[in-house]
Every structure is written in structure tokens, then in C-alpha cells.
Amino acid sequence: FAAVDVIRAKRDGGRLSDEQIDWVVDGYTHGVVAEEQMAALAMAIFLRGMDSGEISRWTGAMIESGSRLSLDVSRPTVDKHSTGGVGDKITLPLAPLVAACGAAVPQLSGRGLGHTGGTLDKLESIPGWRAALSLDEISAQLDSVGAVVCAATEGLAPADKKLYALRDVTSTVESIPLIASSIMSKKIAEGASGLVLDVKAGSGAFMKTVDDARALARTLVDIGTAHGVATVALITDMNVPLGRAVGNAAEVAEAVEVLKGGGPADVVSLTVSLAREMLALAGLSSVDPAAVLASGAAYETWCRMIAAQGGDPSAALPSPSHVHVVKAPASGVLASLDAYAVGVAAWRLGAGRARKEDPVQASAGILCLAKPGERVSAGDPLLELHTDTPDAVPSALAALEGAYTVADSAPGAGPIVLGTV
Ligand code: URA
């Protein structure tokens, strides 16, 4: 093959053959296909799309660019992936809950980029906790604790790592075939036998509408099924931040509240809904995750999971040096609180990074003291902005301009789960 022929075929709206896909992904991984050629092909795919057979093959080729994890665990393995949202700390209570119910959860996670946070950044606010584990450590912890949340091991879908960096700088991220194959190549290579996807829809998500989220969910589920992984997807609301805490340490604190039997209703409800789906895929549908959460067993598993990775689950979390309070402009009911704006503001306060190599502030973020549907009085604190860099407050406030409204009356929160694929 020649890369120019593959690029031309897709540019002109053709279908790539299995052999062309295998060749171009392998060639790119090994430097035979140049960056500029893959950039052109990514744009052609962005504009022309791929059919489900091409997407599945592309995913397979990205998996084969590296090695699959072979997990040596006696329990059924099941994982969850979220397409990313604001305040989405669900992995933190969910992984230990599902482990406490009897399954094994190998959750290889990422760091945040842009306005959505990353699970590893959140957990790194716990003193001593370490993200990098060897394959042997992952298997041993899955057997002893049942849950591992750690960084992806070297060699897991290296083609995706290279391609994702290229897409980031060529404006070719927001393509369903490219997003879906990117997510699923890593998740399938990780080796879990079941996978539950939380596909977010709304202002704080990749997919702004429920229809787009459903299309992404359908594509993700089809790829999983084609590769022999039992896969289901929930479409969930991301117009409002999840829970009250946005930011690394604050989200860990909120997750611990949930594990101790408290926490915001939306976080508890989504955690339990996702746990039910995971347990069904693991053949454990007779176990009631709500009862296990209430029993304290999930909190106990959390403590063991954190300690196994060097963290101290009872240590105080970092607190910010500067707090700025935003007050309610009027009395009434909070009618809206825009997830995207809150995500951008938290990012500007230091919770997120602008470039991959930037550090994040553990204690930066936003506490949403009121959520839509709740009563507020003029002058009540509405949002607490946390940061170690007070110079960032004006730009965070600018991001929050128009992001919340107070009305005479407003409906309460709608359902968090909007559909299943
Ligand atoms: N997350 C991924 O892993 N890949 C994408 O392309 C988008 C989100």
C-alpha cells in the first residue's frame, strides 16, 4: 500500500478495506506513515466518516498496535468508562462498591485535559497515593481488594496515544468514529469481560444533545460487541454539574461522603445505577448495590484500595489558600447552573490543565452550594471558588457570567439517566 492511496480513498468518500486499515495503523505506529499523512487521513475520516465495519477494524488495529493486558483474576471482571463531564467523580465510589459486591474492577484511567477532570488527578490529591502500577501489581490488587484505579500501562494501544495527540492539534477530535475507536481500543485492550459506558449528554459533555450521545453510545456498544466484550451504555445528563463538588480534592471528599452513606442524591443515584449494570454483566444481578453501599462495605473497600496504592485514606485533603464566595443575586429558586461554565471556571482556578505537561492544583475548584430546584435568598452563598492562585478569580468569574439564574419558580432536577443503549 501507499499512504496517499489510502488517504485519497477516504477523501473521495470510499470505504477502507480491512487490509488498508491494518496497514495504515501499523505503519503510523512504527513511523512508516508520516504524521502529515495521518493528519490528512484523520481529517478525511472526520469529514467522510467510517461505517461500523471500518470502525470495528480500526479499533482492532489500534488494540493490536500494543499488547493486551492479560488479567489473572478469579472474579468476573467488569469496568466502566465515562465520556467525561463536570463534577464526574463517579469512578471513585463506583469501583470499590462493585468490588464490595463481588466483581473485580480494573479501571485504567486518564488525566484531565480541558474543562473535564481526570480520575488520576483527583486521586493524586490523597497524600501518598500513586497512579503507576505494574501489571503484576494490578493483578495482585484485583485479587486482594477487587478494585484498581491506575494509569494505563505502557504499551496499551500506543497507536491511540499517538493519534490522540495528533487529533488534538489538527481539530479532528470531535468525530464519532475517531472518539469511539479511541475509547474502545483502550478499554478492550484492558481485558475486562464486561463494560458499562456512561455517555454524557449536555453542555458539560462532548456530545451536547441526547441524539448525538445516543449515536456515540450505539457506536461504542457495537464496537464492544464486535470484539466479544459484553457492553451496555447509559445516556446521562450533563447540563448541570454532578453533585456539589468540582475539583480534585473536593471531589474525593464528596466521593467519601457517598461511600459513608451520605452525599448528593444525583451522585448516589448514578453510582447505584451504573453498579447495577456492571453487576448484571458480571453475573451478579442478585446483589443489591444500594444495600452494600449502606452497609459500609464499599467504604471499607475504598480504604483498602487507596492504601494498596500507598495512599492514606484518613489523611486530611489539601485545602485552598483562597476562597471567593459568589452570592445569590435575588431570592427565589435556582433555575439553572451551567455545567460547561462551572467546568471552565474550575479549570481556570487551577483544577485543570491547559497543556498535557502542566500540573494541577489539588485544592482548586468550585463548591455548588445550591443546585437547580433549590430555594435561595438574595445574598446567600451560591458558589464557593477555591484556589491557591487568587489572580485566577476574575477569569473564573468571567466564565460564570450568565451561568446561573434565579427565578420565582423552577422545576426540580430531572432524571439523571436519560436512556439505555
Ligand atoms: N476520550 C478518548 O479516550 N478518546 C477520544 O477521542 C475522546 C475522548
Image (spheres, rainbow, N blue to C red):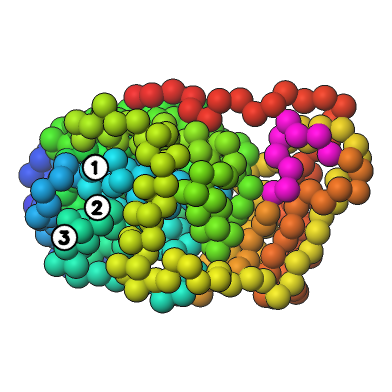
Q: Which residues are magenta?
A: 368-376
Whole-angstrom CA distance, mark 2 to mark 1, is: 8 Å
Label 3 residue near ligand 1, CB within 8 Å: no
Q: Which residue is mark 1?
A: 102
Q: Position of residue 319 (x, y in %)?
A: 64, 71
Q: Which mark is residue 139?
A: 3
The span from disc 3 to disc 2 (Cα, nearest Å) is: 9 Å
Answer above or below: position of 7 versus 17.
Answer: below
- 383 and 8: which one is in front? 383
Question: Magenta stretch: residue 409 in it?
Answer: no
Residue annotated with mark 2: 146
Magenta stretch contains residue 370: yes
Disc 2, disc 1: CB below 8 Å? yes
The image quadrant where one finds the C terminus is top left
Residue 207, visible in the rendered structure: no
Q: Amino acid at mark 2?
A: Gly
Q: Secondary structure at mark 3?
A: helix
Left or right of 233, for residue 400: right
Going by the numbered disc 1, the residue's amino acid type is Gly
Mark 2, secondary structure of its residue: loop
- Circle 3 packing at 10 Å, graded few (<14), some (14-19), many (20+), is many
**Amino acid found under the numbered disc labelled 3:** Ser
